[in-house]
Structures are given as structure tokens and as C-alpha cells.
Amino acid sequence: MKTNCWILGGAKGTVGKALFKLSRDVPNWNFHFLSRDDFHLGVSEEYPDFSPGDAVIDLIPGDFPADSVGMTDDEYHQRFTEPHAQLLKYLANFKLGRLIYFSSGGTVYGLNHDRPIWKETDSVQPISAYGQSKVLLETEVAHSPEHVIFRVGNIFDTDALVLRPKGVCNKFLRMVARDEELTIFGSLENSKEYISNEDVARAILLALNSKVTGIFNLGTGVPFSLDKMIASIESALEKKAKVNVTAANANDVSWFCLDVSKARDQLGFKPQDDLFQWIASQKGKDLT
């Protein structure tokens, strides 16, 4: 008999579609993919019909930054954090077989170190309402005895032809292909972790079928700068990028790298997709 696994809020998202693709080959689980339109975060009567022993994968986005422009921190938390926390409190006290939460890497660790390779045991110091929200929600998830929290690097979608690209790499690919100007906040030397949506989905499935619990960084362990990314895009598309460097975004972390040894050692996670090999594979494609 298969066990129910509920994927909340990410049914139409970058990770959700990768999880849908890869979960078809996973036995013993009956996957239910729900978008945010299928239930209301702050109304327990509208929650899915969970049963003891079920697994829940929380991919609910924090709506950052597009939907939070112009909001105060208090307004952000009232609109997004508080109803999400209510759901997680409910789940943490429910006798789930697994509760997997999708958090963030750079926004959670913040600016508390000088170019570190961040470990899960490092202190957190978020610099935005989005990062603060992730830290608070992690605290709720941790009350579940069967929890796994993933602090994830920047995600790129392995589908370069996606209709509405998300994430800096996919957006830049599309914009260079269309001769649109790239806006860089701060510096071309800004360097971050990048991991594919399919690698994130693979890690989630490993956690789903594991007994380990706790917080896990998820990435490649190697940061890449924006100038290197843009140069790779130019080489693949054989086009020169139009670049405008402007003032840094105060809510953005300009550099981060994640120590992913814990996910490797305890979950057996090993990323399969390399960002720059993937960019190079776009050569000859019409991305406009």
C-alpha cells in the first residue's frame, strides 16, 4: 500500500515540476501536488485531508521580492509569515511520517561572516523580511520529530525554454538572447551558489526515503560570479550582453557558499547538473 505524500504550494513552480517529473519513478508513495489555490494557509478547515504517517513537502513560496515591494517588515509577516506559520504549527503537531521544508541559503545566513563557506551550525542573521520569515518558519518545522529543512542555493531551471523564466541564470539567458539589458545590483563580482531544480528534487526524494532529520545545506559547494556566468552565456549564445551595473540592493547577499558535506554524507546527495555545462548546452537553441 502506498503512503500519501503531499506537495504543498509548488505544484506550478520550478522545483515542483522537477519533483513531478522525477517522482513518477518513485515506488511506495502516492504523490498529491497542490497549488496555493487549492487551500488557504490560515484556515485549518481548508487544509488537505492529512492522515497519520503521511509525508508533507512544503514548497510554498514567500513571494519575494515581487509581491512584497513597498511593504514594511510587519506587513510582510502579517501577509505571508503568520498564516504560513499557522500551517506549520498544525503540521508539526500532526503525526506525520515526514515533514520537509524548503528554506533558503543566502537569505538565512545573511551577512554574519566574511565570505564563509556556511555550515548548518553557523548562526543565522537574515537581512530581509523574507530571510527573517524563513528563519521563523524553520523554527516551527523543527518541532516535528520527522523534519528535514533544506537551506538551498540559487536555483536554475534545466528547462531553458520555460515560458516565464525565474532565477537570475534563466532570466539572463533569455534577456541576452533578446538583446535586452541586464541590470546588475552592486558588482559583477557578486558570487553565489547555483543548483538545478532537478538536483533539488533529487535531494527531496532522498530525504523522503531516509530516516535522518535536521537542517541540510543544498547546493554544489562552489560559488560562481556574475561576470563568469555572463561570459558563459555570451559564449553559448555567441552574443555580447548589454550590462548596466547599479547600486547594490540592501536586501541582497552579495556572496555566499554552502558547505554541503552533511547532505552528501547523511543523505547520499550528489548534484548531477553543472551550471556552466548546462549553459554551454544551450548553444544553437532559439531562446527568444
Image (cartoon, rainbow, N blue to C red):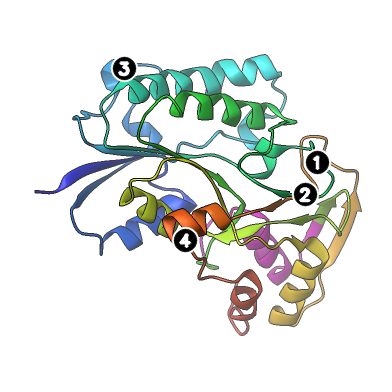
Sequence-wise first label, 4 or 1: 1
| Residue beneath disc 2 | 116
- Place of residue 227 in the rendered image (x, y in percent of width and height, measured from the top left): 83, 66
Sequence-wise first label, 4 or 3: 3
Packing grade of label 3 (10 A; few <14, some 14-19, many >=20) is few
Q: SS of the residue at dot 1?
A: loop
* Relative horizontal placement of residue 101, taking residue 26 as reference (left or right): right
| Residue beneath disc 3 | 44
| Residue beneath disc 1 | 113
Identity of the residue drawn at 65% across and 65% down: 174
Question: Does 271 appear above or below 59?
Answer: below
Hey, which quadrant is residue 109 in on the image? top right
Hey, which quadrant is residue 7 in on the image? top left
Q: SS of the residue at dot 2?
A: loop
Q: Nearer the viewer, residue 284 or 211?
A: 211
Question: Does 245 appear above or below 277?
Answer: above
The reply to whether residue 41 is in sight is no
Magenta range:
162-182
Packing grade of label 4 (10 A; few <14, some 14-19, many >=20) is many
Identity of the residue drawn at 79% across and 38% down: 111
Amino acid on which the number 4 mark rests in the picture: Phe
Q: SS of the residue at dot 4?
A: loop
Sequence-wise first label, 2 or 4: 2
- Place of residue 38 in the rendered image (x, y in percent of width and height, measured from the top left): 32, 32
Q: Nearer the viewer, residue 24 or 230?
A: 24
| Residue beneath disc 4 | 269
